[in-house]
């Protein structure tokens, strides 16, 4: 695999693709290491993960530079992602030994135990847009609960992904964390291998294939897939503040965040002031974002923008790939958008803010809810009753009221519909990585 630096077009890394037998051998080694690792005391497992977190932190800048070189992520953002990964590993090191079952008293001679046990071998397939932070959550939760792991980093940042995983593996017994490199074919082989869980963060199309493969053999699929997150701007809000929120949601990390704002509904009474402020905000983001991850993705984003223009949308700013080398795309604001445009029906995953003006909040809420994805949504409103109606109505895993990003440390999220299934964060991820066994224990007759 050859990865080009999206800032310059120069070669960033070359990585050998794992052959079929290497995937199978990695799974076999993880399976063989499973019994001893599951029997390791939770406190010892936690100590090893905690030590791995310290090792990652010690080379944070090196990792961030690898992420920047392969994905184009600005260095400060990449450093933030590495530190988030370190914090996540430490979080699961603390939570792992506290993960417990419960007991029920039947009669004086009988007790039922509900014990959380590791599921076995977990295949972890991670994305490129925040490769350290996302992988840290899945790897950390799987390892502290006694599972072994076979990890395939994204083919768009294989060097950064492998370096991070190797830092963790160095603190674990042999076979507990295996790493394989490759593109979609390697991921598909790993997802269909003799594993007990496939944890995947990536596209919905890949997620559907994984779900089918897991269903065929009874494995668990833990999926966070695509999103098409709406943002609603209600009447009565400060249009400039709303534009700042919308711009942050649409343009941060060049729109390459799982919960980026993908479609905007604004009530007509504040629409013009909001649009003027959003265009102004787009100008301030031009020098704050990096390139898109590669030329292929740049073409995907521009195809969505061109589809909107062809169907009647107006470009207020941006709308054309940047000149020169690299895969830069400017912050783009579209208005006059209709619900059949690709920017409203599919995940663009780029720095594009498509705006649809609607008559009232109720129309915005109804249209925002009509979508096959169910990752997250944001509502900006000063009205408590409308905020309540929004979080009750929107069929998504996370509803954010009056803040496009944020959330408590350790918070969880569970996507719905085409966006996936299962918790991907928080203490709840430990539940996903374990299976509950019930033991009914009764004293023998005569005792």
Image (spheres, rainbow, N blue to C red):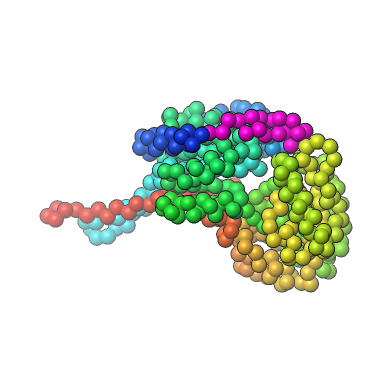
Residue drawn at (66%, 33%), measured in percent from left and top?
2
- The quarter of the picture where the N terminus appears is top right
Q: Quadrant of residue 160?
A: top right
Residue 408 higher or lower than 274, as above or below: above
Please state if 391 lies on the left or on the right of 31 as rendered: right
Please state if 392 lies on the left or on the right of 220 as rendered: right
Residue 116 higher or lower than 364, as above or below: above
Residue 169 x %, y %: 50, 31
Residue drawn at (83%, 69%), measured in percent from left and top?
269
Q: How many marks?
A: 0
Residue placed furthest toward the left:
446
Toward the viewer: 282 or 219? 219
Q: Which region is colored magenta?
A: 1-18
Magenta includes 17?
A: yes
Toward the viewer: 342 or 93? 342
Residue 377 x %, y %: 66, 59
Toward the viewer: 52 or 320? 320
Residue 364 x %, y %: 73, 68
Residue drawn at (62%, 68%), measured in percent from left and top?
393
Magenta includes 439?
A: no
Residue 373 visible in the displayed image? yes
Please state if 371 lies on the left or on the right of 170 as rendered: right
Residue 59 x %, y %: 62, 27
Q: Quadrant of residue 373?
A: bottom right
Residue drawn at (58%, 47%), measured in percent from left and top?
201
Which secondary structure is most common in the magenta stretch?
A: loop
Residue 239 visible in the displayed image? no
């Amino acid at each position: 695999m050859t990865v080009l630096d999206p800032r310059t077009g120069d070669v960033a890394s070359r990585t050998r693709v794992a052959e079929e037998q290497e995937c199978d051998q990695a799974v076999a080694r993880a399976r063989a290491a499973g019994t001893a690792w599951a029997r390791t005391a939770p406190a010892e497992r936690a100590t090893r993960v905690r030590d791995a977190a310290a090792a990652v932190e010690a080379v944070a800048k090196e990792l961030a530079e690898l992420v920047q070189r392969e994905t184009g992520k600005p260095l400060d953002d990449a450093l933030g992602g590495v530190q988030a990964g370190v914090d996540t590993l430490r979080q699961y090191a603390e939570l792992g030994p506290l993960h417990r079952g419960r007991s029920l008293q039947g009669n004086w001679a009988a007790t039922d135990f509900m014990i959380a046990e590791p599921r076995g071998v977990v295949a972890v397939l991670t994305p490129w847009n925040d490769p350290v932070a996302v992988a840290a959550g899945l790897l950390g939760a799987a390892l502290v609960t006694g599972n072994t792991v076979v990890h395939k980093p994204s083919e768009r940042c294989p060097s950064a992904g492998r370096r991070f995983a190797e830092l963790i593996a160095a603190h674990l017994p042999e076979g507990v964390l295996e790493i394989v490199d490759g593109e979609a074919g390697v991921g598909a082989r790993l997802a269909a291998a003799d594993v007990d869980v496939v944890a995947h963060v990536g596209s919905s199309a890949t997620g559907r294939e994984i779900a089918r493969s897991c269903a065929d053999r009874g494995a668990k699929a833990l999926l966070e897939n695509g999103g098409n997150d709406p943002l609603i701007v209600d009447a009565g809000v400060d249009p400039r503040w709303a534009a700042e929120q919308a711009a942050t949601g649409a343009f941060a990390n060049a729109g390459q965040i799982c919960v980026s704002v993908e479609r905007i509904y604004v009530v007509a009474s504040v629409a013009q002031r909001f649009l003027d402020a959003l265009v102004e905000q787009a100008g301030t983001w031009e020098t704050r974002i990096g390139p898109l991850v590669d030329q292929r993705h740049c073409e995907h984003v521009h195809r969505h923008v061109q589809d909107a223009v062809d169907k009647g949308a107006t470009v207020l700013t941006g709308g054309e790939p940047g000149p020169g080398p690299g895969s830069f795309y400017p912050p783009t604001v579209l208005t006059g958008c209709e619900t059949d445009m690709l920017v409203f029906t599919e995940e663009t995953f780029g720095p594009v803010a498509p705006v649809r003006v609607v008559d009232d909040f109720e129309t915005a809420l109804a249209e925002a809810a009509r979508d096959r994805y169910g990752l997250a949504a944001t509502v900006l409103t000063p009205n408590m009753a409308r905020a309540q109606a929004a979080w009750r109505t929107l069929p998504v895993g996370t509803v954010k009221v009056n803040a496009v990003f944020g959330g408590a440390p350790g918070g969880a999220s569970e996507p719905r519909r085409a966006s996936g299934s299962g918790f991907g964060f928080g203490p709840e991820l430990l539940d996903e990585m374990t299976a509950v066994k019930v033991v009914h224990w009764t004293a023998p007759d005569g005792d």
